[in-house]
Amino acid sequence: MIPSSWYLILSAVLFTMGVAGFLIKRSLITVFMSIELMLNAVNLSFVTFAHDWHAVKGQIFVFFVMMVAAAEAAVGLAIIIAIFRTRQTLNVDQIDLMKF
Amino acid sequence: MNPVPDLYRILPEVVLTITGVLVMLLDAAMPKTSRRRVLGWVAAFGTVAALYASLLQLNLPAGTAYYGTVQTDGFSIFFHVLICAIVLVALLVSLDTFPRNNQHTGEFYALITFGAVGMVLMTSAVELLLVFIALEISSITTYILAGYRKTSGKGVEAAIKYFLLGSFATGFLLYGIALIFGATGTTQITEIALRIPGAQSQALVLGGLALMLVGILFKVSAAPFHVWTPDVYEGSPTPVVALMSTAPKAAAFALLIRVLWGAFPTLHSVWVPILWVVAVLSMTVGNIAALRQENVKRMLAYSSIAHAGYLLAAFAGAGTASITAIAFYTAAYAAMNVGIFAAITLASGYDDSLPLIQDFRGLLHRAPVLAGLLLFFLISLVGIPFTGGFFAKFLSFSTAVNGGAFWLAIIGLLNSGLAAGYYLRFAVTIAQPPVANPPELPTYRVGIAVAVGIVLAAGATLILGIAPGHILDAATSAAHSFPAAISSTLP
């Protein structure tokens, strides 16, 4: 059987990839997908810990995270469409009307 | 067994949810051409009912409901009343200033009400799953409200920046919760506190605490997690800024106290130094950046970052005194910040017709009452005696000194002096004689709603400054909801 630490390491790697993607990528859609990757990495941690502790709480948590991620996607994509309508671009570097 | 029916413990949330659903249903049922303003009144009355429901909870003994997920105590009631009051004033200000021809008026009021559900739930949740859901209810509604001027470039830019950075922070918070769950096997806040001393991996606990702190400090816009604040405040409609600069922040501070004193009291020596550094950073970064702003809302955004710093300074205090100071400061900050943004909404309108500080030149001669109120809120933000801002700051810094953080208080006082610079510059601009061709003031009805809203905020700021007794008592009883804080205060 695969030890649970492997899943945790995979989860940490996926989370780091999500953070890196968020910081590096320049397209709004890809940045948004990086956030989804972070959330799903967390989900993997939750199910692993739920398995270790024999606690169903962690699995329930995952359902709620998925549900909230779906709600967030609905709002996020709507905002991205509004951005494209007013600016005709999805490049993060060109969305800079307001600066420090 | 628990003699109190579970439903009583979430009564304000239920009232607010029903109000929100009612507003949406009425919006759908009304003929297309009729005005939607009445829906704002429905939402406002629902909020008053929720405030009353929170006060009714004072009769209940403190306790939990729904399998230990919600807790009603002095602390949750204090923040319930505070948040309902903020939402009420924001609704009253919107009622008279929200544009008549906007097609989404019904949703606007419904979203504010639903957001309020999330914010009040955040203050009574004692189960991290519920904390997460409440935080998201409040965040997702504010993302939409931030982008309400969806045809303006700045409006959508504010929404996307808030949305992306907010979701990013939520990811960190969630990962923190996952690690805590991994270390302790539970997500119930009081059980976490019991299991932490026996946890096998303290590294997992510390990692979880750090990641959760990142998530929550983002929501209170403390440096270095503050970069979203100025842009979002500048691009969002001003009545929305009045709401989101105060109510979600009050809820997030309540959550911070609930998590730190509820789940991690044993790690007090770990999180106090972290918050010390964050407090100093927030004050300094906020004030220095505010000095060079030309846009009014950006300046106030940096000022709110600085105020988050003064608030965090109180965390260095000991036990119940610290929680009292934080609760009191949150109330005072909310009163004066809602007030100043309400006054700015009245002066410059929903569409920001006076965006810059110099546009306010001569306001005292053109609209004396409004300018007077604006000056009063500015004085309170500076922290001059006889206003809520002074007493709150005094309480926060004296708590920090009593807790042994002498230098933190000194840095805070120096920062307050620095902050007076930009507040007074704005005040002087308002009082100067008007220029030859002043920009047009927006025209709309200054009705009973906005007048009541702004008078409520001004009255609260004044009472918190000259007769803070009752609110201080309420804050003290809120602080006594935390057994860990009480036991750490005893010598």
Image (tube, coloured by chain):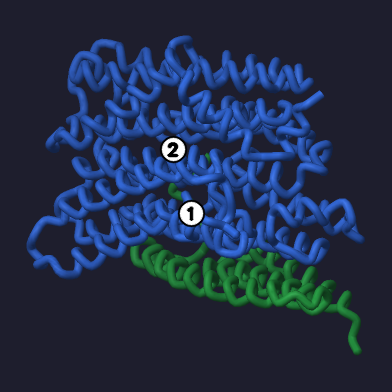
Marks 1 and 2, the one that precedes in the sequence: 1
Tell which of B31 and B167 is nearer to you.
B31
Q: Residue at horizontal 72%, vertical 58%? A: B176
Check the residue under mark 2 and report the chain it is in: B
Q: Quadrant of residue B436?
A: top left
Q: Residue at horizontal 58%, vertical 67%? A: A31
In the rendered image, the vertical position of residue B238 relative to residue B18, given as above or below: above
Do discs 1 and 2 belong to a common subunit? yes
Q: Secondary structure at mark 2?
A: helix
Q: Amino acid at mark 1?
A: Arg
Can residue A94 be seen from the camera position used here? Answer: no
Q: Residue at horizontal 91%, vertical 61%? A: B200
Q: Which residue is mark 1?
A: B9
Residue B468: horizontal and vertical position, in percent? 47, 19
Figure colour of chain B? blue
Q: Residue at horizontal 58%, vertical 54%? A: B64
Quarter of the picture holding the C terminus of chain B:
top right
Q: Quadrant of residue B15?
A: bottom left
In the rendered image, the vertical position of residue A66 relative to residue B371, given as above or below: below
Chain ID for green:
A
Q: Which residue is mark 2?
A: B82
Does B233 sit left or right of B267 as displayed? left
Does B353 sit left or right of B302 as displayed? left
Tell which of B57 and A32 is nearer to you.
B57
Does B263 sit left or right of B431 as displayed? right
Mark pair 1, 2: CA separation = 17 Å
Q: Amino acid at mark 2?
A: Leu
* Dot label at residue B109: none
| Dot 1 crowding, Cα within 10 Å, few <14, some 14–19, many 20+ | many
Can residue B129 be seen from the camera position used here? Answer: yes
Residue A74: horizontal and vertical position, in percent? 44, 72
